[in-house]
Amino acid sequence: MGHFKSAESATIAHGIVKPSKSFSIFTGVALVVGIFFLALKRFAKTEDQSPLFVVLAAAFLLTAVFLFLYTKRFQITYDETGFTVRTLFRKPQMYSFADVETLECKEDSFLLRTKQGNLRLEKELYLGAEDFLAQLQNHVSL
């Protein structure tokens, strides 16, 4: 006969949380809009020398660069002992589950508070967020 896993062994003991593909879509849209404003400024036959198009293009292109770097750099890795958060500009921060002060869960997101700072994750925008939340709830007694 088949083997059945117990509920405890079915929980994921380690994993990675990272931004979903929707961040790549946002990056692409910002890039296209930024290039559109640059092209509009370049090819528009207007007498107006307003820097509006350049400012808008720069804003969208900088947003695209930020989102691209964010999707490549942001990551949470976790295991039985704790978790490590790697953000865009800071070096990786390591936490144990004992460092968690509060865990506030909502329908679509959760907020994790530690002494070093807060971490808010939208469940739909981050791959692996649900499993990470389950791991937190298994290890954190609040």
Image (tube, rainbow, N blue to C red):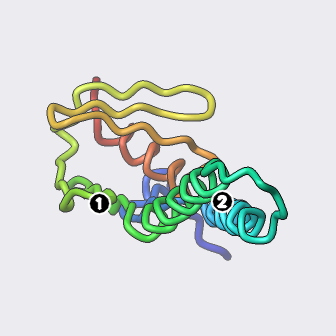
**Label 1 residue SS:** strand
Between 76 and 78, the one lying in front of the other is 76
Gap between marks 1 and 2, in whole Å? Answer: 24 Å
N-term-proximal mark, 1 vs 2? 2
Q: Which residue is mark 2?
A: 30
Residue in front for this viewpoint, 105 or 50 = 50
Tag count in the figure? 2
Q: Residue 83: where, in percent of width, then height? A: 26, 55
The kind of residue on which mark 1 rests is Arg
Provide residue 103's location: percent of width, then percent of height.
36, 28
* Residue 22 visible in rendering: no
Residue in view at x 21 percent, y 33 percent = 114
Checking the image for residue 86, the label placed there is 1
Q: Which mark is residue 74?
A: none
Image position, residue 43 (x, y; %)? 80, 71
Could you tell me which quadrant the N terminus lies in?
bottom right
Q: Give the crowd class for mark 1: few <14, some 14-19, many >=20 residues within 10 Å.
A: some
User: Residue 116, percent across and down?
Assistant: 16, 37
- Closest to the camera, between mark 1 and mark 2, is 2
